[in-house]
Image (cartoon, rainbow, N blue to C red):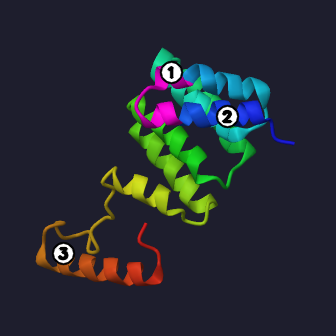
Amino acid sequence: MPNIDAINAFKEALKYMGNGYPDKALPLFTRACELDKANPFYMSYLGLALGMVEGKWDQAEEICMQAVKLKRTQAELYLNLAEVYRLQHKKEDAIDTLKTGVTLTRRDARLKKALSKYGLRRGPVLSFLDRKHFLNVQLGRMRYKVLKTLGKEV
């Protein structure tokens, strides 16, 4: 049976996070986790807030990773872990996390959108020519359209 106090603390903490007050959200996420230790969502947001507020990035990363291990098919958990990496300037780890999330969450649109913010580009179609060469530009556009039609744009 769900713990109502934990749910209420979590909802209130999410409001604070959404309004840019992670410092006010942190004690509420902590409370939610204390009341329901096995909830991966509570853990994931606790880790993110902990890093943002107290700068305890190693601990934040570990908490978020534990949450992902508990519920591998939830995109939100990958987004939070990637955000922890981004805030630490670990771009490659953030990208790897999002790519793993895309694979395991059936290509969730939120993860694809987050990945696109990193400006990842495919290599040129004809690697022996410059990226800006006319043939690469045209073939790249065609490749994009074909992959988009097939639903494989990431």
Tell me if label 2 and label 1 are in contact, CB under 8 Å. Answer: no
- The mark that comes first in sequence, 2 or 1, is 2
Q: Does the magenta stretch include residue 16?
A: yes
Above-or-below relation of 111 to 33: below
Disc 2 on helix, strand or loop?
Answer: helix
- Name the residue that disc number 3 marks: 137
- The mark that comes first in sequence, 1 or 3, is 1
Which corner quadrant holds the N terminus? Answer: top right
3D distance between C-alphas at marks 1 and 3: 49 Å
The label nearer to you, 1 versus 3, is: 1
Neighbours of disc 2 within 10 Å: few (<14), some (14-19), many (20+): few
Give the residue drawn at x 34%, y 52%.
Answer: 117
- Name the residue that disc number 2 marks: 8
Disc 3 on helix, strand or loop?
Answer: helix
Please state if 92 lies on the left or on the right of 32 as rendered: left
One can see residue 135 in this view:
yes
In this view, the residue in front, 67 or 145, is 67
Q: Is the magenta stretch mostly helix, strand or loop?
A: helix
- The mark that comes first in sequence, 3 or 2, is 2
Neighbours of disc 3 within 10 Å: few (<14), some (14-19), many (20+): some
- Name the residue that disc number 1 marks: 24
Tell me if label 3 and label 2 are in contact, CB under 8 Å. Answer: no
Give amino acid for label 2: Asn
